Image (tube, rainbow, N blue to C red):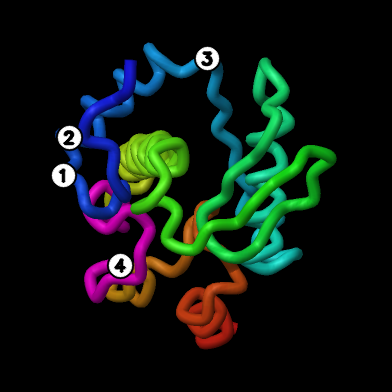
Amino acid sequence: HPIAGLADSKKLTPARRDKLYDEIRAKALCCSIAQASVEEIDQLNILQATLLAMRRAVLGLRLKPAMVLVDGNRLPMLDIPAEAIVKGDALVPAISAASILAKVHRDRWCAQVDAEFPEYGFAGHKGYGTAMHMEALREHGACIHHRRSFAPVAQRILSLS
């Protein structure tokens, strides 16, 4: 049965994403969520680390797909046919579902980081460079979850040395 209401994860409320997350997990033949570490992002750059995480997610699937659809205009290195679709998270239900799984997973991770480092407010800004996040960086410096290659973090580190 198709899943009603799939859309670009950024266009959905957190409550709607959570509900869809559970339905996607229940109905999907399999799914895999992967990430790149802060160190990998700093070493490779954000694009290459994103492609690495995509590759890990595909390789982590219990079933090998016949085709991989990716949101955007770049593909990870795979031994499976793949297609990059610009705005795919708004156009292709399978990509919408993947974007919802990824967003909910990340938001939950940010809530865990917030419990560990409440002074940064990760539960609110979700890792984005909001004014509040930048102020917390200025006040407290970077924690282990901050990318050293992110300009405001790098500037803060330089200003301390």
Residue 93 visible in the displayed image: yes
Q: How many marks?
A: 4
Look at label 4 and name its amino acid. Answer: His
Asked if residue 141 lies left or right of residue 59, the reply is left
Kind of element beneath mark 3: loop
Which range of residues does the magenta coloring cover?
120-133
Which is more toward the observer, 58 or 144?
58
Instruction: Please report the residue visible at 32 percent of the width from the left and 44 percent of the height from the top.
Output: 114
Q: CA distance from mark 1 to mark 2?
A: 5 Å
Amino acid under label 1?
Thr
Q: Crowdedness of circle 1 by 10 Å Cα count: few (<14), some, many (20+)?
A: few
**Nearer mark to the viewer, of 2 and 3:** 3
Label 3 crowd (10 A; few <14 / some 14-19 / many >=20): few
Q: Quadrant of residue 98?
A: top left
Task: Give the amino acid type for the residue marked by disc 2 in the picture.
Answer: Arg
Alpha-carbon span between mark 2 and mark 3: 21 Å
Q: CA distance from mark 3 to mark 1?
A: 25 Å
Q: Which residue is mark 3?
A: 29
The Cα atoms of the two marked residues, 3 and 4, are separated by 38 Å
Image height of 128 relative to 40, above or below:
below
